[in-house]
């Protein structure tokens, strides 16, 4: 009996070729493993395909709920957006896939895990580092990083080995998608001067097709977690799917990003992230209302660190645990409702309310009912300005010599 390897199997060309290639090259028995985190159309046919290609076993799992509750929502609470643009959909999926692969490897007594990532991207780093954190004894095989085949050569290999190549018109793009977003790369997008053609987009409508009338939605949060839409309580998957559909209909969530990969390459990435765009914006709007100025400033810094470490494959690190502890603590009053207007590609926050709001009408108003005592201000300003006055007397470049 040969040793076993657990291969993260998508059903696509590369991982299908990998089933045969690993057997040929390493003599290992392949257990194909497919995870649905909101991207898989037909789990059963993928499973069957893996078996037909010679996998000794083919396992599938629906991990959408754990993906949302244990990876996506913590990142939402952190306001994690890489380089101010990318909501990290793919990056959040990888550590979960690694974790599930490791679990299966242990259960099945496999000595290795394998994935279809190339040697140029971030995903190899995320998977390899996560596997190493969870099960350092497992060997990692990455055929696409080792076999040095061009796309053409991969297709030839597939033909020679009777591997069915998807007959659907081959997409010129490389696409990865899950419930939190869709990433599109390659083809004419590799010239950053080219505007993305409409055929790149599958989740969001172009502006010409979006409704003339805006759509208003109300999102309810409890401790930083979205729990309702238009006053209806929804489970996490339903909530994301409904917001996805509404925002996509109004063309919200298209992102065009020149991104800095961990391996040092700048790449041009197109994202469609209707649900994440809306939820991240709404969550921040609620935080603006319930957190103090200092909490918000510090949390902004945490958000940058958090996004970087997720992007860089360090989900299973002590640093992430520590930042998560801060983030979770910061969310204890992030409860309330945010009103969002979706219209012609824009997602605008137009209202917010919370039982823990720090916005105090009687302090803010310029109308009747004002309780702010303006006669306190001169004394406050006198002391506030003391160091400036002191410095101005002896050092200031603004001081006029007479
Ligand atoms: N650039 C994004 C990231 O690093 C998306 C990667 C998409 N992956 C893919 N296999 N097409 O997270």
Image (spheres, rainbow, N blue to C red):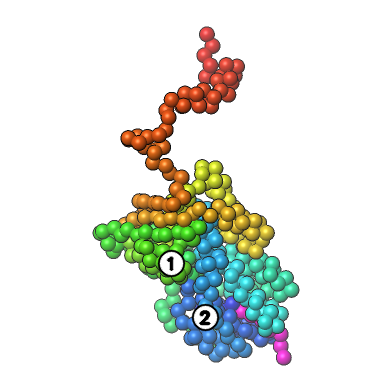
- Which image quadrant is residue 61 in? bottom right
On the question of residue 147 being in view, the answer is no
Q: What residue appears at the point 35 percent right and 65 percent down from the top-left corner?
A: 246
Q: Is residue 7 left or right of residue 252?
A: right
- Which image quadrant is residue 111 in? bottom right
Q: What residue appears at the point 61 percent right and 59 percent down from the top-left corner?
A: 312
2 or 1: tag closer to the N-terminus: 2
- Residue 202 on image: x %, y %: 39, 69
Please rate how many residues cluster around mark 2, counting C-alpha atoms within 10 Å: few if below 14, some from 14 to 19, many from 20.
many
Q: Is residue 141 left or right of residue 363?
A: right
Please rate how many residues cluster around mark 1, counting C-alpha atoms within 10 Å: few if below 14, some from 14 to 19, many from 20.
many
Q: What residue appears at the point 61 percent right and 65 percent down from the top-left corner?
A: 126
Mark nearer the viewer, 2 or 1: 1
Magenta run includes residue 2? yes
- Residue 382 on image: x %, y %: 51, 23
Secondary element at tag 1: helix
Q: What stretch is highlighted in magenta?
A: 1-7
Secondary element at tag 2: loop
Residue 363 to residue 58: above or below: above
Q: What residue appears at the point 52 percent right and 19 percent down from the top-left corner?
A: 398
Query: Residue 114 versus residue 380: which sits nearer the camera?
Result: 380
What residue does disc 1 label?
A: 240
On the question of residue 395 being in view, the answer is yes
Q: In this view, does 2 lie to the left or right of 253?
A: right
What residue does disc 2 label?
A: 11
Query: Residue 205 versus residue 326: which sits nearer the camera?
Result: 326
Magenta run includes residue 107? no
């Amino acid at each position: 009996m040969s040793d076993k390897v657990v291969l993260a199997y998508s059903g696509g060309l590369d991982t299908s070729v990998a089933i045969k290639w690993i057997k040929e090259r390493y003599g290992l028995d392949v257990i194909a493993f497919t995870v649905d985190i909101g991207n898989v159309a037909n789990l059963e046919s993928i499973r069957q395909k893996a078996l037909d290609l010679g996998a000794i076993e083919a396992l599938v799992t629906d991990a959408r709920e754990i993906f949302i509750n244990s990876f996506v929502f913590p990142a939402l609470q952190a306001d994690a957006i890489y380089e101010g643009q990318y909501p990290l959909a793919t990056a959040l999926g990888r550590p979960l896939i690694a974790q599930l692969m490791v679990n299966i490897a242990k259960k099945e007594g496999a000595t290795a895990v394998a994935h279809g990532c190339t040697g140029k991207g971030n995903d190899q780093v995320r998977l390899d580092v996560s596997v190493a954190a969870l099960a350092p004894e497992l060997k990692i095989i990455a055929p696409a990083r080792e076999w040095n085949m061009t796309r053409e050569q991969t297709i030839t290999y597939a033909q020679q080995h009777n591997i069915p190549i998807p007959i659907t018109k081959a997409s010129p793009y490389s696409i990865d998608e899950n419930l939190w977003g869709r990433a599109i790369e390659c083809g004419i997008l590799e010239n950053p001067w080219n505007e993305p053609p409409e055929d790149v987009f599958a989740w969001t409508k172009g502006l010409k097709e979006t409704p003339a009338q805006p759509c208003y939605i109300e999102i309810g949060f409890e401790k930083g977690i979205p729990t309702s839409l238009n006053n209806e309580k929804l489970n996490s998957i339903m909530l994301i799917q409904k917001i996805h559909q509404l925002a996509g209909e109004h063309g919200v969530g298209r992102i065009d990003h020149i991104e800095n990969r961990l391996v040092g390459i700048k790449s041009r990435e197109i994202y469609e992230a209707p649900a994440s765009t809306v939820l991240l914006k709404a969550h921040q709007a609620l935080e603006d209302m319930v957190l103090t100025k200092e909490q918000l400033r510090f949390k902004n810094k945490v958000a940058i660190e958090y996004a970087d470490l997720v992007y860089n494959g360090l989900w299973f690190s002590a640093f992430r645990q520590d930042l998560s502890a801060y983030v979770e603590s910061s969310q204890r009053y992030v409860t309330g409702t945010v009103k969002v207007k979706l219209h012609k590609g824009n997602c605008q926050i137009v209202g917010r309310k919370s039982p823990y709001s720090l916005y105090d009408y009687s302090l803010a108003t310029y109308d009747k009912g004002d309780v702010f005592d303006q006669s306190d201000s001169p004394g406050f300003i006198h002391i506030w300005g003391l160091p400036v006055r002191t410095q101005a007397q002896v050092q200031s470049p603004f001081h006029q010599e007479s």
